[in-house]
Image (cartoon, rainbow, N blue to C red):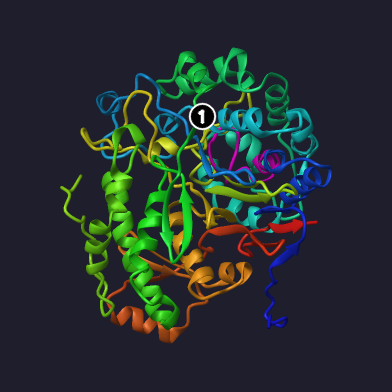
């Protein structure tokens, strides 16, 4: 029975349609569309357009997008809406420009041609049922007239005030009066309203061609970028449908977008964990196993995953029984170990939403500008804040994820979808940058292995093995911490919550929704 004294919330239930997002205004916009007869795609586009306004440090039209769509009675299909590097971008060109080991977040070279609007427009053309002008109505109003800043958004905004203050144009928009907006204050972005109106009227051409594109290119060029109007024009049709990658986890089929996304890593972590009796484990063993599987998965991600055209066959290899068995055998439940590749040579911020409509169509949708406030570079002529996804590229000749002409970088944002016996069961996703693949595995294990309801699975204290430490949330108790440390984990108690999540489960003619309490959002349905 649910503990109503816990200060947590239970899962949400509805009978016909549901949407779960990380912002209340975004959820409300999507629910309004569903209630008026719109489908899952319509609701998602209404919701994400609002979130691009009201959660500007996490997402925006200057970012990228991935989606998994499961039309009722059909197989899951994946949409890749990640942008490409400029045609002139090479390792040699960036090193000649003075870069050495990595591409900084605030560099113009961290800006690939944004792919989100191409993805939105392709998804809308293929599966939408309402005009974009109608779907963007709430977002345009919030951008022009203002919206209330919610508590979690305000906290993240304040935490990123110093970095956004480094760009005079971004600071003018996002630091009114020189400070980050407080919870409950009103903020507006009139130029963003114009961009959404332009996209609603002209489609992807309103972003990737004409005066708007020319102005964005001009601003990026002034910052040292290699972008051209031709690069942006090609971005108009850059989004495309692809086959998902999937793996069985204890009888459930888990679907992820293929590389260049890191969804493959979530599957690797799950397949490693599948060899252990997770349901019978105590908390400390579950956390240790997850950490060790995560280290192995991410080590392979950083060495092998890149633009699909540059890592052909990597999914089939990493999910093969031979490789999974080899990785699983490396886990020692008594001590933490350093990750290593199975037998290959060594190579030297986000919003998510789930929707299920009255017809049973399910959509798992994620849109991101990567770091908080992305690259922090805002074009004053168009109001577009550019993402920083190109910072994921390597500056190592020959590396699969080395920057190159019209190449997509490895991506951390990953929507997820679960099916069983050919039927769609659950669109789900976890936000949180690098954490997302680890988060997918932890969330699904809590639901499948331990039978937790969606909200309870999201509320579990989180941990993340990254950069040589095991980050843990304060909810993990002292006894567990002591045992993890004894096994060799270097612990770091985080001061900001690890990630966020949304999910909707379809079962017995009912919808169960969860929305992570680490964010401001909610799941609502009717």
Quarter of the image with the C terminus in it = bottom right
Task: Identify the magenta region.
Answer: 47-67
Total number of numbered discs in the rendering:
1
Work out whether 255 lies above or below 64: below
Nearest the camera: 447 or 333? Answer: 447
Task: Out of 80 and 515, give the one closest to the viewer.
Answer: 80
Extreme-bottom residue of the structure? 479
Q: Would you place residue 304 above or below residue 342 in this image?
A: above
Disc 1 marks which residue? 239
Q: Residue 220 placed where, x, y %?
A: 48, 23
Dividing the picture into quarters, in which one does residue 86 lie?
top left
Q: Is residue 492 left or right of residue 511?
A: left
Q: Residue 457's x, y, as percent?
A: 56, 70
Packing grade of label 1 (10 A; few <14, some 14-19, many >=20) is many
Q: Looking at the image, is 316 positioned above or below residue 10?
A: above
Q: Residue furthest right?
A: 36
**103 is within the stretch colored magenta:** no
Residue 140 visible: no
Comparing 406 with 362, the one in front is 362
Residue 136: % across, % down: 74, 34
Q: Is residue 57 magenta?
A: yes
Residue at left 42%, top 82%? 280
Q: Position of residue 389 (x, y in %)?
A: 44, 38
Q: Is residue 399 visible?
A: yes
């Amino acid at each position: 029975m649910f503990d109503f004294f816990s200060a947590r919330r239970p899962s949400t239930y509805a009978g016909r349609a549901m949407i779960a997002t990380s912002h209340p205004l975004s959820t409300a916009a999507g629910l309004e569309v569903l209630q008026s007869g719109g489908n899952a795609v319509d609701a998602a586009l209404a919701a994400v357009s609002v979130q691009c306004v009201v959660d500007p440090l996490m997402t925006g039209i200057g970012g990228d997008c991935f989606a998994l769509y499961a039309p009722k009675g059909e197989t899951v299909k994946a949409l890749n809406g990640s942008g490409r590097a400029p045609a002139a971008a090479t390792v040699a060109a960036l090193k000649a420009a003075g870069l050495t080991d990595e591409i900084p977040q605030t560099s113009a070279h961290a800006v690939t041609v944004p792919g989100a609007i191409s993805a939105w427009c392709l998804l809308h053309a293929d599966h939408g049922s309402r005009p974009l002008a109608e779907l963007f109505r709430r977002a345009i109003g919030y951008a022009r007239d203002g919206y209330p800043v919610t508590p979690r958004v305000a906290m993240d905004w304040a935490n990123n005030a110093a970095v956004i203050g480094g760009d005079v144009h971004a600071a003018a928009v996002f630091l009114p009066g020189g400070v980050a907006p407080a919870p409950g204050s009103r903020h507006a972005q009139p130029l963003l309203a114009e961009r959404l109106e332009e996209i609603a009227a002209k489609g992807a051409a309103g972003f990737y061609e004409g005066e708007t594109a020319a102005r964005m290119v001009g601003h990026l060029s002034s910052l040292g970028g290699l972008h051209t109007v031709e690069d942006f024009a090609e971005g108009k049709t850059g989004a495309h449908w692809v086959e998902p990658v999937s793996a069985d986890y204890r009888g459930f089929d888990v679907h992820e977008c293929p590389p260049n996304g890191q969804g493959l890593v979530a599957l690797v972590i799950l397949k490693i964990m599948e060899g252990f009796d997770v349901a019978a484990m105590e908390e400390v063993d579950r956390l240790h196993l997850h950490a060790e599987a995560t280290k192995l998965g991410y080590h392979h991600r950083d060495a092998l995953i890149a633009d699909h055209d540059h890592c052909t066959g990597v999914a089939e290899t990493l999910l093969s029984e031979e490789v999974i068995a080899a990785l699983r055998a490396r886990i020692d439940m008594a001590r933490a170990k350093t990750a290593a590749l199975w037998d290959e040579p060594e190579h030297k911020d986000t919003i998510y939403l789930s929707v299920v409509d009255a017809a049973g169509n399910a959509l798992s949708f994620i849109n991101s500008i990567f770091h908080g406030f992305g690259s922090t570079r805002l074009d004053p002529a168009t109001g577009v804040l550019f993402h920083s996804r190109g910072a994921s590229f390597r500056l190592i000749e020959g590396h699969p994820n080395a920057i190159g002409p019209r190449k997509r970088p490895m991506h951390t944002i990953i929507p997820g979808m679960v099916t069983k016996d050919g039927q769609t069961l659950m669109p789900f996703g976890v936000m949180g940058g690098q954490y997302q693949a680890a988060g997918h595995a932890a969330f699904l294990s809590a639901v499948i292995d331990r039978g937790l309801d969606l909200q309870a699975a999201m509320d579990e204290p989180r941990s993340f093995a990254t950069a040589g430490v095991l980050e843990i949330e304060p909810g993990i108790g002292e006894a567990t911490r002591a045992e993890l440390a004894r096994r060799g984990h270097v612990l770091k108690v985080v001061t900001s919550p690890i990630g966020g999540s949304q999910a909707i489960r379809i079962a017995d003619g009912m919808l169960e929704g969860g929305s992570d309490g680490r964010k401001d959002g909610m799941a609502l349905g009717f």
